[in-house]
Amino acid sequence: MEKRDELYAGKAKSVYQTDDADLLVLAFRNDTSAFDGKKVEQLDNKGAVNNQFNAFIMGKLKEAGIPTHFEKLLSPTEALVKRLDMIPVECVVRNVAAGSLCRRLGVEEGIDLDPPTFEMFLKNDALGDPMINEYHVRSFGWATDAQIEQMKALTFRVNDVLKALFMAGNMLLVDYKLEFGVFHGEITLGDEFSPDGCRLWDRDTREKLDKDRFRQGLGSVVESYQEVGRRLGITFEY
Ligand code: TMP
């Protein structure tokens, strides 16, 4: 496999073409962004930690029968993935109230959500990732009814797998965001799963171990991601 030209640079990852039209290289950078790119900083080792964290999680999801784009790790900061036609919709499940849900509905952070909620957001930084519903997705042709149902079902299956995984490390999976695409006709999980795109709290102290540490200026951002990895048994290489 040969890495070729850069196809696209996102806020935290860059995407490269390869000599295989079906495969891309994802390079995880140290750039850390929040508030739709309004706050950006470089955090040492963040790219390596997220790349290896994501590889571990994608492996667990694959074992559970969830189709993902992940193929293999290439280096501490790079992974080989399938090339998906991305759907510009962010799927969010919440087990505990936090973040924009609290701001939007005026509810207290930390309330258990039983059953969990499912929300969709349009992936558009300029618009601040507005919340959308299934009708918008259908009317604008971002996905079909069947694809929406598959994304929702897969997002909830991910919840079952990961809630239990984090619970075993004494952590609460508060909420998370997934992005899907289509690979040869099949809805497939893309992007990444890392502490950049979810909320994780220590189960006993409710200490925040995710990107809220960066958003809220709490410090020890990468150290917290490493702690989450340690609790899951991940050994990071740099
Ligand atoms: P929110 O509370 O800001 O709506 O975010 C819910 C979860 O989804 C939280 O874990 C962060 C994640 N998320 C992202 O990582 N990127 C995004 O663009 C959005 C909208 C949410």
Image: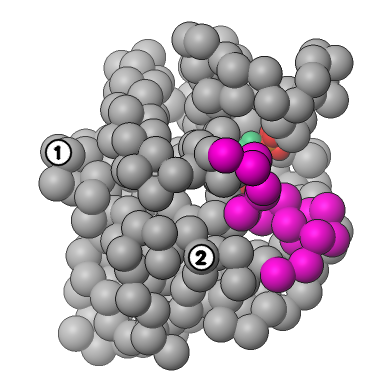
User: What residue sits 44% from the left and 44% below the top?
Assistant: 170
| The stretch drawn in magenta includes residue 218 | yes
The secondary element bearing badge 1 is classed as: loop
In this view, the residue farthest toward the front is 204
Residue topped by disc 1:
65
Q: Nearer the viewer, residue 90 or 165?
A: 165
Total numbered badges shown on the rendered structure: 2
- The first of marks 1 and 2 along the sequence is 1
Residue 10 visible at all: no
Query: For this view, does 140 lie left or right of residue 236?
Result: right
Residue topped by disc 2:
227
The percent coordinates of residue 93 (x first, y second) are: 51, 27
User: What residue sits 32% from the left and 54% below the top?
Assistant: 57
The percent coordinates of residue 120 (x first, y second) are: 57, 26
Residue 115 visible at all: yes
Magenta-highlighted stretch: main secondary structure? loop
Residue extent of the magenta highlight: 204-220
- The chosen color scheme is one colour
Q: Quadrant of residue 108 in the image?
A: top right
Q: Quadrant of the C terminus?
A: bottom left
Indicate the quadrant of ligand 1 in the picture.
Answer: top right
Q: Nearer the viewer, residue 124 or 95?
A: 95
Q: CA distance from mark 1 to mark 2?
A: 27 Å
The percent coordinates of residue 39 (x first, y second) are: 84, 62
Q: Quadrant of the N terminus?
A: bottom left
